């Protein structure tokens, strides 16, 4: 099967670019005063070594070593007559590394002589120069073009025009900007991309070079409001710093991967790196974002069709009010509260059982049992849920994560939950393994939360995943997750609707710290008419608040709350302010939600109980 072209690939999933070429050539021994483009002729094995590194790291396409292979830049080295030879050799080297599965992009950079916007003669010459290089790349067989690191929109449009005159290749058009979201010539982001994004041969637009990932994230948010074309993001590995006389890029691969996840969440469709990035940076980006995208891909085209449409056969499910005490409260419209307790990392349950008993004594309705939160390895959540219900007069809500098991194992767990008397489930897609302590673990994502919700609904009707009839239908209360702070509210609302259509009977939100965000989500989803339980997280310290703001996907912490938490000077003050903030959130949304799901941060159940007003803040331990 032929490798999909860039246009088709962008329709299917996120696309991973490569990283820096010059950085890697320098690391492998090329001198700074070398013409890096000439290495395609003089040292092709060195260039191939760089390409091989990115292919091994998981790049979907590699860029030819031709960023400066135009007649103006090559003339500085006396090589203007070798434009065609250098570009053709670059494509041949890249093809050897790419094989059948990886695309080859022809890299084209600025001419390095100004944009020539006010001089018709120069503009014509510049078109010819771009056309000469692009024609050489096209004839050598690149799959598409990447026009990158342009600082003036007129020069970029000149290159786009040249490409259109000599070939019909798709173009990814990228510019570099400053920290003020302007080009170095003072063009605001919107003005810079207004005409570029409307060029017919441009299939994606984006940003590369100049700035690090943090600033580029803010630029991405602005760019999304300017264009409806796919967006490419390839930042530097931070801003270079002087170290022993050398310019060094200090961003670690892990740091870049964290920002890559945010790029993905904010709509980037091509993600890679520029100056300072290495194959290790790309490898970590692919691991972090790839698992998230696979989960998203399952959402768009789930392989399991059990939840896709109302089944034609099956029994009438047990009425919601008869399935569990939580089900009865949901059916009656009564409010309820739960506390989340994470399964232990080992098999010692004494501490967990004591916390469950304390919750039961204070009238907590249920214990949320997460499934591998933040991709951590812990005791089986199903075993933990059973032990919770044995420890005290309280029900468990078993979280079921789609990440780690195929559909057969997930169905087996649902049968097991029913057999062991665990009647409440909360179905989530799950964090990718890169978030946790075992980044090399494999994410399965056979189905996502929408599809698995449909599977459980059918099990309640007595139908298994193959459509076969069970001797008895299950009686599980089906919950799902929701993210009111999602960057794309329309998409999150649509996912929520699909979960309801698949059979969801209640929802629990991610921890929410801004009442307006939750109320906006509730208004947007009011027509879907299932109870929504508000997720509440009481901060324990300023450091904890920063972690929630910066490291937990889907969570947004308003700056004023971070400022309040920063004023705490002691552990006791931090906890007290955190509980105070959580209580304010509860009061602001109490009348609009079906209940509260309060986390016990770091296993401290007393903080959760204080948040719910069950104990006084002075009793915190």
Image (spheres, rainbow, N blue to C red):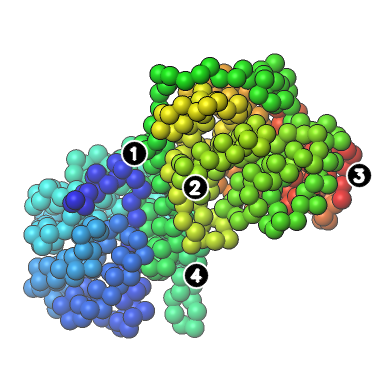
Among the two numbered marks 1 and 3 on one chain, the one whose residue lies closer to the N terminus: 1
> What kind of element bears circle 3?
helix
Residue on which the image places disc 3:
618
Does 253 sit left or right of 37 as displayed? right
Among the 4 quarters of the image, the one containing residue 467: top left
**Residue visible at 27% across and 47% down in the picture:** 9
For the residues marked 1 and 4, what is the alpha-carbon distance in whole angstroms?
A: 31 Å
Kindly check if marks 3 and 4 are in contact, taking CB atoms under 8 A apart as contact: no
Residue 440 in view here: yes
Q: Is residue 324 above or below residue 148?
A: above
Residue on which the image places disc 4:
250
> What kind of element bears circle 4?
loop
Q: Where's residue 334, x and y in %? A: 73, 19
> What kind of element bears circle 1?
loop
Residue on which the image places disc 2:
405
**Residue visible at 15% across and 78% down in the picture:** 41
Instruction: Indicate which disc residue 227 carries.
Output: 1
Q: Nearer the viewer, residue 275 or 411?
A: 411
Question: Mark 3: few, some, or many residues within 10 Å (few <14, many ≥20)?
Answer: few
Does 442 sit left or right of 482 as displayed? left
Q: Nearer the viewer, residue 359 or 217?
A: 359
Q: Is residue 35 above or below residue 234?
A: below
């Amino acid at each position: 099967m032929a490798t999909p072209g860039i246009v088709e690939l962008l329709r299917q999933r996120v696309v991973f670019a490569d990283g820096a070429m010059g950085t890697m050539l320098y690391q492998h021994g090329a001198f700074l005063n070398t013409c890096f483009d000439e290495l395609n002729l003089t040292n092709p094995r060195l260039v191939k070594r760089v390409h091989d590194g990115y292919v091994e790291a998981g790049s979907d396409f590699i860029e030819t070593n031709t960023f400066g292979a135009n007649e103006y830049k090559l003339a500085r080295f006396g090589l203007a007559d070798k434009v065609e030879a250098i570009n053709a050799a670059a494509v041949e080297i890249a093809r050897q590394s790419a094989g059948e599965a990886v695309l080859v992009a022809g890299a084209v950079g600025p001419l390095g002589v100004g944009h020539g916007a006010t001089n018709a003669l120069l503009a014509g010459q510049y078109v010819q120069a771009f056309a000469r290089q692009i024609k050489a790349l096209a004839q050598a067989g690149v799959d598409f073009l990447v026009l990158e690191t342009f600082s003036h929109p007129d020069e970029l449009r000149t290159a786009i025009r040249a490409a259109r005159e000599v070939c019909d290749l798709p173009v990814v058009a990228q510019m570099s900007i400053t920290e003020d979201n302007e080009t170095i010539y003072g063009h605001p982001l919107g003005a810079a991309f207004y005409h570029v994004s409307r060029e017919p041969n441009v299939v994606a637009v984006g940003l590369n070079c100049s700035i690090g990932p943090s600033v580029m994230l803010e630029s991405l948010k602005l760019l999304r409001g300017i264009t409806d074309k796919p967006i490419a993001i390839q930042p530097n590995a931070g801003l270079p710093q002087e170290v022993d006389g050398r310019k060094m890029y200090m961003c670690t691969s892990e740091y870049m991967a964290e920002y890559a996840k945010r790029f993905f969440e904010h709509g980037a469709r091509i993600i890679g790196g520029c100056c300072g990035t290495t194959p290790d940076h790309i490898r970590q980006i692919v691991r972090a974002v790839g698992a998230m995208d696979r989960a998203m891909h399952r959402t768009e085209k789930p392989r399991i069709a059990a939840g896709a449409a109302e089944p034609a056969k099956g029994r009438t499910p047990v009425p919601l009010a008869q399935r569990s005490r939580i089900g009865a409260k949901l059916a009656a419209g009564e409010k309820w509260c739960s506390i989340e307790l994470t399964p232990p990392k080992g098999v010692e349950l004494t501490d967990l059982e004591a916390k469950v008993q304390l919750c039961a004594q204070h009238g907590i309705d249920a214990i949320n049992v997460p499934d591998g939160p933040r991709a951590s390895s812990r005791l089986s959540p199903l075993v933990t849920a059973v032990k919770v219900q044995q420890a005290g007069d309280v029900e468990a809500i078993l979280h079921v994560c789609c990440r780690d098991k195929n559909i057969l194992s997930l169905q087996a767990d649902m049968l097991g939950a029913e057999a062991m008397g665990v009647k409440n489930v909360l179905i989530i897609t799950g964090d990718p393994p890169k978030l946790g302590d075992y980044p090399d673990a494999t994410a399965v994502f056979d189905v996502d939360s929408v599809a698995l919700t449909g599977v459980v609904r059918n099990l309640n009707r007595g139908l298994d995943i193959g459509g076969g009839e069970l001797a008895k239908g299950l009686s599980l209360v089906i919950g799902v997750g929701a993210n009111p702070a999602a960057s794309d509210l329309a998409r999150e609302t649509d996912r929520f609707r699909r979960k309801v259509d698949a059979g969801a009977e209640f929802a629990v939100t991610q921890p929410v710290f801004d009442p307006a965000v939750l109320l906006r989500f509730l208004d947007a989803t009011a027509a879907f008419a299932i109870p929504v339980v508000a997720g509440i997280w009481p901060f324990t310290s300023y450091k904890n608040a920063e972690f929630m703001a910066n490291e937990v996907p889907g969570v947004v912490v308003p700056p004023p709350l971070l400022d309040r938490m920063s004023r705490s000077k002691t552990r006791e003050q931090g906890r007290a302010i955190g509980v105070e903030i959580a209580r304010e959130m509860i009061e602001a949304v109490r009348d609009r939600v079906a209940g509260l799901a309060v986390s016990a941060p770091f296993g401290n159940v007393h903080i959760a109980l204080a948040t719910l007003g069950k104990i006084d803040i002075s009793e915190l331990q």
